[in-house]
Image: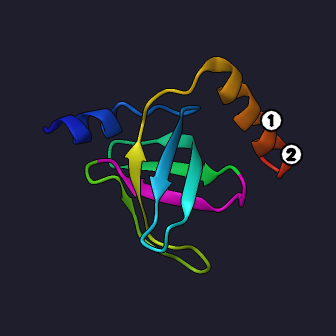
Amino acid sequence: MNSRESKIRGIAAGDIFHAGAPNGASLICLALDVSKEHIEARVVTTQHVYQFDRKTGIAEAGEDRVPCEIDSVIPLPQHIYNVMLSIDKKYGGR
């Protein structure tokens, strides 16, 4: 397992990570559920839900969503993490 795959596999429910898309979209994602093969995550601002492959970090496009890839799993400072959670809640997150 390479370093990137190891970092992606380290994502747990409740973590916030960043994904990028080929069209330049920047997606701040909140991990909702993590299984052996997938990470289900909601984009904080749009509330779209993606399923990322835990090995590759890639989520395929679906309906009105763009394909994207996890490009950062660096933990946010606590105060920024809390702001992201409140933005998620404001836009309809649970």
Residue at image coords 51%, 73%: 66
What's under tag 2, amino acid-wise?
Lys
Residue at image coords 70%, 21%: 79
Residue at image coords 24%, 34%: 6
User: x, y (%) of residue 93?
Assistant: 77, 46
| Element type where label 2 sits in the image | helix
Q: Is residue 39 magenta?
A: no
User: x, y (%) of residue 89?
Assistant: 82, 42
Q: Quadrant of residue 30?
A: top right
| Residue 60 to residue 19: above or below | below
User: x, y (%) of residue 41?
Assistant: 55, 49
Left or right of 71 on screen, residue 47: right
Given the current orientation, which residue lies at the most extreme top position?
78
| Element type where label 1 sits in the image | helix
Which quadrant holds the N terminus?
A: top left
Left or right of 45 on screen, residue 33: left
Using a 10 Å C-alpha cutoff, classify the residue at mark 2 as few (fewer than 14 neighbours), some (14 to 19) or many (20 or more): few
Instruction: Tell me if label 2 and label 1 are in contact, CB under 8 Å.
Output: yes
What's under tag 1, amino acid-wise?
Ser
Which of 48 and 83 lies nearest the eye of the viewer? 83
C-alpha distance separating marks 2 and 1: 6 Å
User: x, y (%) of residue 33?
Assistant: 53, 42
Using a 10 Å C-alpha cutoff, classify the residue at mark 1 as few (fewer than 14 neighbours), some (14 to 19) or many (20 or more): some
Given the current orientation, which residue lies at the most extreme front position?
24
Q: Quadrant of residue 31?
A: top right
Q: Where is mark 1, residue-wise?
A: 86
User: Which residues lie in the magenta part?
Assistant: 45-54
Q: Where is mark 2, residue-wise?
A: 90
Q: Is residue 50 magenta?
A: yes
